[in-house]
Each structure stands twice: as C-alpha cells, then as structure tokens.
Image (cartoon, rainbow, N blue to C red):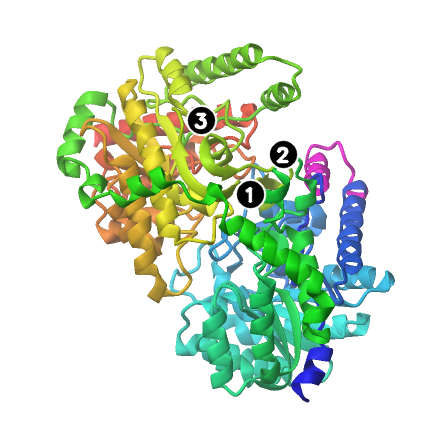
C-alpha cells in the first residue's frame, strides 16, 4: 500500500474516556448505592447513561471507533480480575451472594474482610487494585461486562472496539496472595490464563467485535528475557486462534524498547504506540524492525496525560514519517483519556486566552479528529485549525505568566549547602527527643481529618456569598477545636489541626502560589469514587504570603502537645498538577521548593516544632525505565531537602508516602534526610518496614496500621499485630504508630473508633516492651 493510500485510510480513535460524567454523576450514584439511598438498578442505569453519553460525544466529535469495556464502577484492573475469575478466596462468598456487593467488597473491604491491596497505575496518580494470585489460582472466563458494553455501543450504530488489560500486564501487576510465598511469580500462570482470554475473545467476536484492544503498558518497563519470552508466547498463542477478532496490542507511557521487536513480529493485526512520551525512541525502533508491513499502527500523537494543546504541525510531521512504516496509520491519544478532565469549555474562571492553551478530553478528541483529517486529506483540509493552533501556541510561549525574572534569579542562586541540614540525623534525633519528650512508639495521624458535609457546605456558601469570611472562619475554628480536643482525649501524642480549611492537599497551595491555575470542573479519577481537580502549573512559582501558619498556630494554642505543620512537598505539587511542559521538571520543582522553604521557615518561627512535608508522589513519578531514574531522583530529593533543610536541629521534619511500591526508592527515601517518615503498610502487611530494614534505613518510621481507604474499623488486636510485625524490622525507639494516610475521605464515627483502637494498640505493645 502506498503512503497516499495509507493516509486516505487514517481514522481517529481513543483508548478510553473519563468515566465520571460532567458533574461526577457516577460518584454520586455509586456512593448513594453504598449508603442505601440508591438502588442497584438505579446506579447501574446512571452508569449506562454515562457510557452512552461518552460514546455519543466521541462519535459527534468525529471519532471513528469508540472504546468499550474501559468504563468501570471502580477500577478496570479489578474488572479484569472478575473477567478472569481470579476472585480471592476471602471474597468468594460475597461475590457469589451478590456480584455487585462482592465487587465493592474486593475494592473497599468489609468489617470482616480486608480489601485487595491498592497501588499506583505505573507513573500516574490513578490507583488500581492489585490482583492476588497463587499456584492454586484457577481462572475462569466471565465476559459478561465486556460483551454487554460492546452490544450497547453497537446498538447505537457505532463502530466499537473493546479494550482489555492484556494478559502479560495483568500478571506482571499481580502479587502473591496472602499466605503464598513471596517468591511466587504470577507470570508462571500465563499458560493457565491464556485459554481464558481466548474464551473472552471468542465471545466478543460472536457479539460483533471486529477489533479488540489488549493493553500491555507493562512492556514499556525494563523487562527480563524471560518476561519478553512470555509476551512472545502470549501473542503467538492468541494470534494463532481462529475464533477471534483482530487484535490491537497497545502500549503507552514510555518507549517499548526490547518489547517492540517481539510485538512487531507477533501474529496480531495491529500495534498502538505512544509517540508523545517516547516519540523518537519508538520511531527509531519501529524503523529498525522494518516497520509493520501488513499491519495497522495506531499512533498516539496527542498527549493523553497532560492538558496543553497539541502542536498540530509537529504531530502531522510525526504521522507523515509513520506512513511508510505500516499498512494503515490511525490517530489517537497516547493513552486513555481517563487521566485528564472532561471538558475545558466548562471552565468559566480562566481567562479566555489562557483557556485556549488547554485541551481536556473533549478538546483532545477534536485534535485527534483534525490530525486524522489532515493526514488523510492534506493540511489544506485543516488550514483553519492549524492557523488557530499556531496562534495559541505563540500566545502561551510569549505570555508573562511563564517567565518571572525574580523567581528565576533566586532559583539560579541555589547552592548545595541550601539543601543540607546543619547537623547529621544522629545529633538531630537527640535534640528532638529532648525537645519533644515523646513516649516510646509515639502516635500521630498523617494530617487530614474527615471533611464533613458541613465543612463542604460552608466552603460552598463562602464561594457563593451566602456567608462572609468571618462566619466561615468561625466554622473552621470550631472544627479545629473539635479535632484537637478529640486527639487529646484519645491520647494521640503528636497532633494535627485536621486541615478543615483545605479543599485538597495540592489545590489549597496552588491557589496561593503564583503561576498556578485552578479549575472548577477539572475532575480526574484518583481511585474508586475519589476524584481530584489537579491544578494547572502554567508559569513561574512564588509565594506571596504565609499559607498555613495562621491555622497551625491557632491549633497549637489549644494544646500543650506538639501540633504538626502540614505541607505538600514539591514533587507531589508537580505530580498531582498538570505540569508545564516548556521547561525541565527539575527547574519547576526547584521553584516550588523555594516557595515552600519560605513557608517552613515561617512555621518554625511561629513555634511549630514538627513539620510534615508530604511526598506521596515521589515513587509514583519514578520513570518507568531504570536508565532514566538517577536523574529524576537527583532533582526530586534535592527539591525536598531544599524545602526542609533550613530549620533548627531540634525541629523535627516528617514526610509521608502512600500506595506505591517503595522498594525501588528506599535509597532515595534515605536521601531525603527527613527525621520521620510515615508510609502505607496495612494492606501490604508491613512490606515497606521489611524493605526499610533491608536497606538499613537509620531514621524513624511509621508504617501504617490503619487502612484508611476502607470503611472497616481495625480492632485493637489487629493493629497491635501489625505493630509487632513492624517491630520485627524497625527498633522500638524508631517506630511510630499512625494510619496509612490522611483521614479526609473517612466518616467521623469510623475515624474515632479506629484512632481509639490505634492508641490502645500502641499502649498494649508499649506494655509488652516494658515487661520484656
């Protein structure tokens, strides 16, 4: 096929779309079901309506082939676990009794049964539920969800392509089930899993699927020869099936590397590659293997993870280069649009010219359609779009928002000494223990307390002008008093003010820093029904005035116990924002760190003796390829130290991380030089404590004993058992007792009971230590 014919065949498609609806209708329906206010039929009807709306939006925009199966009540990896029948034994009875309730029990747990572990989806802020597998796992096919959603789309007269998590990625994401040896490798179950995929593929073909997409993002990571051989075997076997649709194997988030030759020669009909994060590498590798003769190439040239408009001319040049490398070239985003908000046109508070720099899911769909049209019909067919795009790109590049000389001068003057504490940890620890006077196994929380309906209503009333600033602040003071008095009564040793005034741990700071933009409707799924509005980091960053000192000082005035100052660290401020793409991330991180350094100094000057700088995203943002990690960790740890190193030796610096695989970054955690770190550990059964011990981590640590992403209340014995497991790895004089994460999403009743049990567990174990 000639390049001209290939161009004429270009089609527009996407891999996935935001699930929540314009007004988070899915969140409201699911949470209403959990609370008994919405029936199962009603919430499922809402979900079906959202699916139809998504497909119609895409089709109306000109998307030629819509995805199905990407929609989820909670998580698409959990959906895959259901599809392949890998239900953990402890959840099997609940699933058999009621499939919907059993599904949510796996996601959230019940009072009697713990949920599946949760961790980050590659280097995004999306959380997936980790499959639990063992040598006795029996897979069984359940294609009901996938077939039903395909039929829904086909009934609307749409060309539809089911999207499934691929078998290799599914197994590489899995972990050994509880009680199974940690040395068990789930990938050894591949031959057992492939027949189940074969059955699902046959069902989808029978339901009318022409193509099925199998997502294999795990193949963009460093993979061993054995893992690449498994991928080769998987797609050799699936490709050899006679009763199947055409197969499109998709990867994204980075370069494929050694997996590209494996997939290029596999007997599948198409590949989908990321040409944003790794454009040059994937282009070169594709050319090196001789392209994809006779196959379909879906080119992800529109960034599916960021919100800046595409450079259409640049993307067309990339697409033109690809025309000679495949039988057919189609156009898509680099990954599912799940990772961006729905519609920038809904924003009313962003200046119109700046709004033209932004592309959310709907705008990205339009870009994809324009690129497919330009590729098929020539640039003259999209001359207007190209001219407008050039003007918008120039407007952004020339805007004074993006360049503040004072910020850049200060950042350029930073020295190595600015990022180092004045004394080593061993000396600081002595000073801090004398200053704080804490008991063995000190108890604390990670920061936030429940954000009640009353708090959210007060915040909404302030925005709408229904109450004044004075009335709102009285409400915040009352909430802080309640939180402080509860903690004192419960017996916690280091208190927090509860963050009643904060809408979000990143947005709250972004709204007070120059260079950030905030959205009103830019919701993105973090996990389950938890949605966040990542702010947009558009320009150079500085702090105009203190951001947290007033409320922290007020809280401290209510108690003789230390109250932590709570800040979000520079890496997390970047990772949980839509970050600018016109300068190196390390440069932006340094600007944010300097603004936060000023806040740390002001907190200390106001009498705050314990300051927590949260960095839950440090592991999340770790590059997927090991070769890229040293450079990232160098600027990331420097930014943290720059934030926190200007304090006195007796001021205790805490940090916090949650829901990630920490083993890869223990050395970097050490390099942060924080005095205390709290980490998620309850769902992973203290795995991180063992990883810290194996590294020889010399500082204090609080591996969590209370899983805050589940509504269940851990009993005293359960929390004490986790503490004892923690003591096997971390000496008592360096072990803290705390929840896994902040309590913002929990209700007050479960929070009270859980923290009372946490304190009781700490006292129990202290008594055991004193008696031994």
Is residue 628 a member of the stretch shown in magenta? Answer: no
Q: Choose top left, top right, bottom left or bottom right for residue 29.
A: top right
Q: Is residue 84 left or right of residue 550?
A: right
Q: Which residue is mark 2?
A: 349
Q: Which residue is mark 3?
A: 755
Residue at 40% in and 69% down: 222
- Residue 575: tell me if it is visible: yes
**Towards the viewer: 426 or 589:** 589
Is residue 37 a member of the stretch shown in magenta? Answer: yes
Dot 3 and dot 1 residues touching (CB under 8 Å): no
Q: From the image, state whether disc 1 or disc 2 is nearer to you.
A: 2
The range drawn in magenta is 25-41
Residue at 49% in and 63% down: 277
Name the magenta segment's main secondary structure. helix
* Real-space Cα separation, disc 1 to disc 2, in angstroms: 45 Å
Q: Earlier in the sequence, mark 3 or mark 2?
A: 2
Q: Which residue is mark 1?
A: 113
Estimate the x, y position of residue 499 in percent, counting from the top left: 47, 25
Image quadrant in which the C terminus is located: top left
Residue at 65% in and 69% down: 331
* Real-space Cα separation, disc 3 to disc 2, in angstroms: 40 Å
Q: Residues within 10 Å of mark 3 (few under 14, many from 20)?
A: many
Q: Secondary structure at mark 2?
A: loop
Q: Earlier in the sequence, mark 3 or mark 1?
A: 1
**Towards the viewer: 441 or 637:** 637
């Amino acid at each position: 096929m000639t390049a001209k014919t290939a161009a004429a065949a270009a089609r527009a498609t996407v891999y996935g779309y935001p699930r929540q609806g314009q007004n988070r209708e899915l969140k409201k329906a699911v949470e209403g079901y959990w609370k008994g206010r919405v029936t199962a039929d009603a919430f499922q009807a809402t979900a079906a309506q959202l699916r139809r709306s998504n497909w119609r939006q895409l089709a109306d925009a000109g998307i030629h082939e819509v995805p199905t199966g990407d929609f989820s009540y909670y998580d698409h990896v959990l959906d895959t676990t259901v599809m392949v029948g890998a239900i953990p034994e402890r959840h099997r009875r609940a699933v058999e009794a009621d499939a919907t309730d059993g599904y949510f029990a796996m996601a959230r747990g019940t009072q009697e049964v713990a949920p599946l572990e949760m961790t980050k989806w590659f280097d995004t802020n999306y959380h997936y539920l980790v499959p639990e597998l063992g040598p006795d796992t029996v897979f069984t096919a359940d294609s009901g969800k996938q077939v039903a959603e395909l039929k829904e789309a086909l009934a609307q007269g749409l060309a539809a392509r089911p999207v499934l998590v691929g078998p290799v990625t599914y197994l590489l994401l899995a972990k050994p089930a509880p009680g199974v040896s940690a040395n068990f490798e789930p990938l050894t179950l591949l031959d057992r899993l492939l027949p189940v995929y074969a059955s699902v593929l046959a069902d989808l073909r029978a339901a009318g699927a022409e193509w099925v997409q199998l997502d294999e993002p795990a193949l963009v990571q460093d993979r061993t020869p054995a893992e690449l051989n498994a991928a080769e075997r998987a797609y050799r076997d699936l490709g050899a099936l006679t009763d199947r649709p055409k197969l499109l194997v998709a990867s994204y988030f980075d370069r494929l590397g050694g997996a590209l030759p494996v997939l290029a020669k596999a007997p599948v009909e198409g590949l989908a590659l990321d040409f944003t994060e790794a454009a040059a590498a994937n282009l070169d590798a594709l050319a090196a293997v001789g392209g994809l003769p006779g196959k379909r190439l879906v080119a992800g040239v529109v960034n599916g993870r960021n919100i800046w408009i595409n450079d259409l001319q640049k993307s067309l040049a990339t697409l033109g280069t690809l025309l000679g490398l495949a039988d057919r070239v189609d156009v898509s985003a680099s990954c599912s649009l799940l990772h961006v908000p729905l519609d920038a046109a809904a924003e009313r508070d962003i200046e119109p010219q700046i709004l033209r720099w932004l592309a959310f899911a709907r705008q990205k769909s339009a870009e994809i359609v324009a690129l497919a049209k330009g590729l098929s019909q020539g640039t003259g067919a999209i001359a207007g779009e190209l001219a407008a795009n050039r003007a918008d790109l120039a407007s952004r590049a020339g805007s004074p928002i993006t360049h503040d000389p004072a910020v850049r001068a200060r950042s350029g003057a930073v020295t190595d000494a600015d990022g180092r504490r004045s004394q080593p940890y061993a000396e600081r620890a002595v000073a801090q223990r004398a200053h704080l006077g804490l008991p063995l196994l000190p108890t604390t929380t990670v920061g936030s307390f429940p954000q009640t309906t009353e708090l959210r209503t007060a915040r909404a009333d302030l925005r709408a002008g229904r109450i004044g600033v004075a009335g709102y602040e009285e409400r915040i003071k009352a909430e802080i008093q309640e939180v402080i008095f509860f903690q004192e009564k419960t017996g916690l040793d280091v208190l927090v003010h509860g963050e009643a005034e904060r809408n979000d741990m990143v947005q709250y700071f972004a709204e007070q820093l120059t260079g950030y933009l905030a959205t009103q409707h830019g919701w993105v799924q973090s996990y389950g029904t938890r949605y966040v509005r990542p702010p947009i980091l558009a320009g150079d960053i500085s702090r105009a005035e203190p951001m947290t000192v007033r409320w922290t000082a007020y809280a401290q005035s209510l108690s003789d116990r230390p109250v932590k100052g709570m800040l979000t660290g520079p890496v997390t401020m970047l990772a949980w924002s839509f970050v600018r793409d016109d300068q190196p991330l390390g440069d932006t991180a340094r600007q944010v760190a300097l603004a936060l350094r000023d806040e740390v100094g002001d907190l200390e000057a106001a009498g705050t003796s314990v300051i927590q700088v949260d960095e839950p995203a440090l592991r999340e943002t770790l590059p997927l390829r090991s070769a890229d990690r040293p450079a990232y960790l160098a600027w990331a740890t420097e930014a943290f130290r720059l934030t926190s190193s200007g304090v006195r030796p007796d001021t205790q610096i805490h940090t916090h991380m949650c829901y990630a695989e920490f083993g890869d970054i223990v050395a970097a955690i050490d390099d942060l030089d924080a005095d205390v770190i709290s980490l998620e550990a309850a769902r992973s059964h203290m795995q991180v404590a063992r990883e810290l011990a194996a590294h020889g981590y010399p500082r204090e640590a609080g591996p969590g004993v209370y899983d805050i992403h589940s509504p269940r209340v851990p009993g005293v014995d359960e929390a004490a058992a986790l503490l004892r497991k923690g003591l096997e790895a971390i000496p008592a004089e360096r072990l803290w007792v705390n929840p896994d994460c902040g309590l913002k999403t929990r209700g007050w009743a479960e929070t009270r009971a859980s923290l009372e049990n946490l304190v009781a567990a700490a006292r129990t174990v202290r008594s055991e230590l004193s008696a031994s």
